[in-house]
Structures are given as C-alpha cells and as structure tokens.
Amino acid sequence: MAVSVELGKALDKAYENSTLDEILAAPPSALAGLTDKHDELLAQLGIKTVRDFGSNKFFATAGVLVALSGKAG
C-alpha cells in the first residue's frame, strides 16, 4: 500500500521532492532548520545521515521521555 506524507515544512527545499530513501541517506541538514555546521557537529557523534539521526539511541530515548511526559501523572 502506498502512503503519502506531506513533509515540505520539515525538509530543506532541496529535498522536498526526494524519495524517502534519498532523505534517509541525506545529511541531517536535509531537515529544515539544520545547517552544514550542524552536520559537522553531529558527525562528531557518528551521525552522518538523517537515518543515523533518527535511529540514534540517545535521541530516541529523549523522544520517548518527552512523549511520556505528556502522559505522566
């Protein structure tokens, strides 16, 4: 089943018409608001692609904690 998702505001203009595989293989600066400088800093943490960024255990844990914070109490 094909799925369509509008990511225009989440991506740098250069990547708006890219496939999912192309976006996941792109540097983090493919995400709107991140720059080449962010790419350099994230590379120091071993994060060189959007896929690396999204699957990083520390960012994933932080995301879960934030999601849980809205459910606590």
Image (cartoon, grey):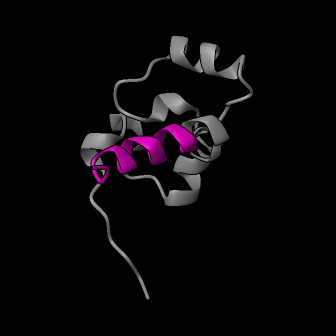
Asked whether 47 or 19 is in front, the reply is: 47
Tell which of 21 and 40 is nearer to you: 40
Q: Is residue 61 above or below residue 37?
A: below
Relative to 19, say whether 8 is above or below: above
In this orientation, does residue 67 appear? yes
Which percent across, then down, holds residue 9? 25, 42
Q: Is residue 64 left or right of residue 8?
A: right
Answer yes or no: is residue 16 visible.
no
> Residue at (42%, 23%) from the top-left corner?
34
Q: Residue furthest front?
A: 73
Location of the N terminus (image quadrant):
bottom left
Q: Which residue occupies 37% across, 77% down?
A: 3
**Residue 53 image offset from top left, x and y in percent:** 59, 38
Q: Residue furthest bottom?
A: 1
Tell me the magenta residue range.
Answer: 60-73
> Dominant secondary structure of the magenta stretch?
helix
Q: Is residue 19 above or below residue 72?
A: below
The quadrant in which residue 31 appears is top left
In this rendering, position of residue 46 left or right of residue 22: right
Number of numbered discs visible in the structure rendering? 0
In the rendered structure, does residue 67 fall within the stretch colored magenta? yes
At x 36%, y 40%, the residue is 11
Q: Is residue 17 magenta?
A: no
For this rendering, which residue is in front, 68 or 25? 68
Residue in the picture at 53% in, 11% down: 37
Q: Quadrant of residue 12?
A: top left
Left or right of residue 26, residue 45 in this image = right
Q: Position of residue 69 (x, y in %)?
A: 34, 44
